[in-house]
Image: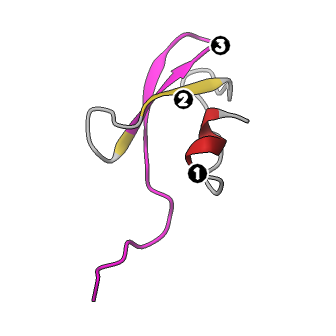
Amino acid sequence: MSAMTEERNDTPQPACPFCESTDVTRESAFGSEISKSKYYCHNCRTVFERLKYDGKRPGTGR
């Protein structure tokens, strides 16, 4: 089971924006902002951030 599958079953595996590899590991649930996660690419050995947005509207509690 990949790191992304453990995080959310409905979120696709991220691809590295530099080499397009999907051999990535989530390094941190939070990146430079609360809305981003930090990933490490094993192919090109680059750290990158990805937005956590899943395409759904958040509930407003109303």
Where is mark 1, residue-wise? 8
Identify the residue under disc 3: 43
Query: Which color scheme did the rendering employ for the protein?
Result: secondary structure
Which residue does the numbered mark 2 point to in the structure image? 17
Figure check: 21 above or below 43: below
The residue depicted at 29 percent of the width and 79 percent of the height is 60
Q: Earlier in the sequence, mark 2 or mark 1?
A: 1
- Rendered residue at 27%/89% (across/down): 62
| Total labels drawn | 3
Query: Looking at the image, is 38 positioned above or below residue 5?
Result: above
Quadrant in the rendering for residue 32: top left
Helix or strand or loop: what does disc 3 sit on? loop
The kind of secondary structure the magenta stretch mainly shows is loop
Label 2 vs label 1: CA separation? 20 Å
- The spot of residue 33 in percent (x, y) is 26, 40
Q: Nearer the viewer, residue 5 or 24?
A: 5
Residue 17 locus on image (x, y percent): 54, 29
